[in-house]
Image (cartoon, rainbow, N blue to C red):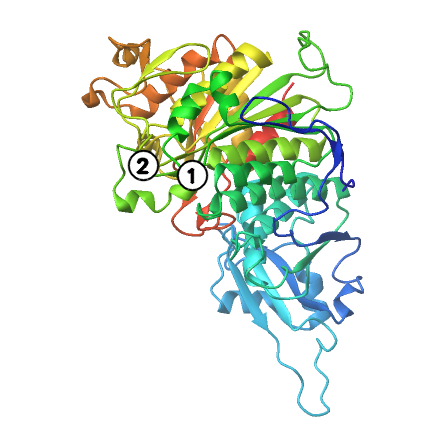
Amino acid sequence: MAGPARRTVVRRDETGRRRAAAPRRAPASSSLPELPAVSVARGTVASTTLLAEPDVDALVLPVAPAAEEDDGVQPRAGVADAAVRYGIDLGDLAERAGLTGAAGEAHTVHLPRASGAAALPWAGLPARVVLVGTGSGSPRDLRRAGAAVARSTRGLRRVVTTLGAEGGAEDARAVVEGYLLGAYRHATRATGTPPEPPATELVVLGRHPESALASARIAAEASWVARTLTVTPSDTKTPAWLADQVTRLATGPGLSVEVLEGDALAERGFGGIVAVGGGSAHPPRLVTVRYEPVGAPSAGARTRPGAAGRHVVLVGKGITYDTGGISIKPRESMVAMKTDMAGAAVALAAVLGASRAGVRHRVTALLPLAENAVGASSYRPGDVVTVHGGTTVEVVNTDAEGRMVLADALSHADAELDPDIVVDVATLTGAATLGLGRQHGALYTPDDRLARSLEAAGQDTGELLWRMPLVEDYRWVLESSVADVRHVPSDPGVGGGSITAALFLQRFAGDRRWAHLDIAGPARATAAAHEVPEGATGFGARLLLRWLLQLR
């Protein structure tokens, strides 16, 4: 990893003046927990000397489901060599343990120590052998296998595995990515201190390119960033605190940060952000993170068709806590609302990952940050708010605050940033969760090619999207007699709440190539499963990073 980069941080005060524009050195550290170490070692189980090293606590071996005509599980890379080297029948152990080889299944064999002068065949070798199911061997199943390794070896020092050894770079990447994602634990304090000692170091046996491990680490780190910020309690995570975290984290090559705050927001026309944040003691912010790859066109220069790079704007909803405002939520619905800025965390993680991965496109992340609180100056149902660009919006429900701040950011992107593609990501509607559950994000776009590329990135990363329709016949429900548009339907019986929210946002993207990701369901998990932790999942960070890397 390159050392801290020099970048420019611009912060505008209540008068709109630039408070600090000189380049400065990035902080040496951030508040994020550190990912465990992963390395590649050439060799096989039969030949490697690693297994005799005293700090190697376990050997992890892959097994797969049996074919229809066979009984038991099928051994994969290294199992036969391990059986010879250890002098034990691993197939018999797997059968007695009832293993099926399903992806993510894991069984640990604890080998006994010798008593007296007798020497056992495995003397000097790791006393733990972990059998892990790889399922079909697809990237999804190998990610699950990697996550199972993380869960079953937590607290050990070093672990050696042959998972992915039979495949290519993509298999190795999936195993390592799953391992790093599964090793994540939510921090116990806002400083990011891990709840236990650093995770186990993983050593992958085989002839894998280092680039596969590096790309897996960058992708997993994006999820770690999004998860850690999203799970931080809102008594710490004010808009100001989150803006400061962005400044601390955006230290990579080509990154710069601008923070807009105070009266400057109103003066620049960001009426939606000001209205939503007006009821809180913690004032709102608009944070812009820019990534400029080497050789990219300068800001403001239109990218020519066929040129190497594009300008992509990612817009992330950043409601640091959502009470619902005057249209207050029930208590039960508020409990998870520290995660209502997951979209901003995902957009930030993607642009940071773009810098780490050397994405060849210009990427700008717009993060409108506000706390939707109940106060004397809260915006109200019945208000008419003028958002960026001069559009007037009739407010019907102050709990539909996310689309208000996104309207500002989308309009700003269209009018002033000249992007080739705009993608917004938000925990926007409960309707998306009702329709798609917690396994898929809702994807809205009128652009078929853009939809296919985002869906493909979702398939590659396991962060799945389901394309939803922008139903033209529903647009009339957003008509208003007192403003240009209502932000929620005039007739609550129409339904399609996720669709009408997308239709509202579409008008602010102008004629740009645009997509909207409603991640209200998969951004939060009620229970841990495979590489996904309970609580904040970071859904969308790896998807967007993979999409940026594949974008042509």
Q: Residue furthest front?
A: 15
Label 2: few (<14), some or many (≥20) within 10 Å?
A: many
Q: Position of residue 148 (x, y in %)?
A: 54, 55
Image vertical order of residue 466 relative to residue 308, above or below: below
Q: Which residue sits at x=60%, y=37%? A: 246
Amino acid, disc 1: Pro
Q: Which residue sits at x=28%, y=46%? A: 332
Residue 74 shows in this picture: no
Quarter where residue 197 is shown: bottom right
Q: Position of residue 66 (x, y in %)?
A: 52, 53
Give me the C-alpha separation between circle 2 and circle 1.
27 Å
| Label 2 or label 1, whichever comes before in sequence order | 2
Q: Nearer the viewer, residue 330 or 530?
A: 330
Label 1: few (<14), some or many (≥20) within 10 Å?
A: many
Q: Which residue sits at x=59%, y=36%? A: 349
Q: Position of residue 294 (x, y in %)?
A: 77, 23
Please name the residue that numbered disc 1 is placed on: 522
Image depth: mark 2 or mark 1 in front: 2
The answer to the question of whether label 2 and label 1 lie on touching residues, with beta carbons closer than 8 A, is no
Is residue 478 toward the left or the right of residue 10 in the image?
left
Please tell me the numbered disc located at residue 374.
Answer: 2
Q: Position of residue 177 (x, y in %)?
A: 61, 45
Q: Nearer the viewer, residue 286 or 452?
A: 286
Quarter where residue 24 is shown: top right
Rendered-image quadrant of the N terminus: top right
Residue 202 shows in this picture: yes
Quarter where residue 58 is shown: bottom right
